[in-house]
Amino acid sequence: MKRNNVSKLERKYYPLQFAVPGLIIFTVFYVCSIVGGFIFSFTDWSIYNFESPGFVGLSNFKDLFASQSFLPALGHTFLFALVTTVLKVGLGLVFALLLNRAFRGRNFFRAVIFLPCTIGALVIGYVFTFILQPDTGILNEALRSIGLGGLALNWLGDTNIVLYVVCAVESWMWVGFNTAIILAGLQSISTDVYEAARIDGASAWQTTRAITLPLVTPSINTTITLCVIGGFNIFDIVMSMTNGGPNGATQVISKLSYDAMRVGTLGYASAINLIQFLLIVIVISPLLNFLRRREPDI
């Protein structure tokens, strides 16, 4: 009898043996990091008083909001998140609809469009830096060779367009990832639904509008959420392509935090990270509620 009780307990708590290591890693590297960052954002922690930071209250936040670089960086971050979300989700939906059709070489094109997001962002950033060079870049050389030299621009040196150029590179990199998510949603739709629509005489556009788009809405909402969060956290592609320049035209919040850490003001960097985290929560919470209300009841 006692042995049976032990066996029942072993079966009951057996799954916890696999969950505990993951929970420990999550707690140490995520929860503790957030709590530590929150605490240090109210201190003067730096490389000069690394072992004995002092409490300074809201001083770091006052300095941040008084900084001339914060509001432009905030605007660039919002604009980057908006533009890349529209491009990545919009193009991802179009490509998913096309690649969901049956045609020869479909799997090849699926692999090709997904390939860029398997390459490191820093690598892609450096490669496009050479491609977009104003004098020797491949893009401008190609434009000049076909008689369109007037369209050859200083892509990474013009403050009016450089942020949109970085947005385009970021979107090119991740559109395949969004395509894969939406394509998975499309393939989960039962063929019986489309068969019933064809029997009722629905056209291809009517089927797409009334069946495909509503049923794939959860997948689209997932990509929107991921793209917005990724847009607010953008750092690597900006760092590798422009380093926040020229003249701060691509400066974003994550780059401000990096600059603060680079000079050793760790408490100030923690304050920037906390503001960034709160901004994401403030934006994502109502966005999720809005997107969920638009999902069909299945």
Image: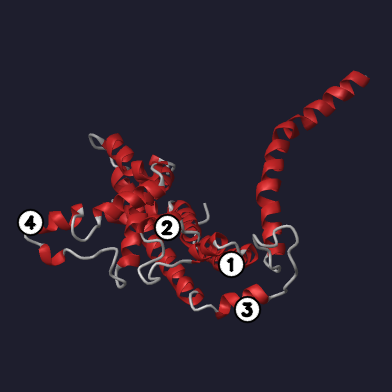
Residue that numbered label 1 is attached to: 272
Q: CA distance from mark 4 to mark 3?
A: 54 Å
Residue 202 seen in render = no
Residue 14 seen in render = yes
Mark 2: secondary structure:
helix
Residue that numbered label 4 is attached to: 146
**Residue 228 position within the rendered picture, expressed as x and y whole percent measured from the top left:** 48, 61
- Which residue of the protein is positioned furthest toward the left in this rendering? 147
Query: Around disc 1, counting alpha carbons within 10 Å, would you say few (fewer than 14), some (14 to 19), or many (20 or more)?
Result: many
Residue that numbered label 2 is attached to: 239
Q: Give amino acid for label 3.
A: Lys
Query: Around disc 4, counting alpha carbons within 10 Å, would you say few (fewer than 14), some (14 to 19), or many (20 or more)?
Result: few
Residue that numbered label 3 is attached to: 62
Q: CA distance from mark 4 to mark 2?
A: 32 Å
Q: Give amino acid for label 4.
A: Ile
Determine which of the numbered discs, if any, sits on residue 129 in the image. Answer: none
Tell which circle, 4 or 2, labels the residue nearer the N-terminal end: 4
Query: Around disc 2, counting alpha carbons within 10 Å, would you say few (fewer than 14), some (14 to 19), or many (20 or more)?
Result: many
Front residue (pair 86, 253): 253
**Residue 291 position within the rendered picture, expressed as x and y whole percent measured from the top left:** 51, 62
Is 202 positioned to the left or the right of 22 in the image?
left
Q: Decide: is 107 above or below 204.
A: above
Residue drawn at the location 24% of the way across and 58% of the way down: 133
Tell which circle, 1 or 4, labels the residue nearer the N-terminal end: 4
Whether residues under marks 3 and 1 lie with C-beta atoms below 8 angstroms apart, the answer is: no
Mark 3: secondary structure:
helix
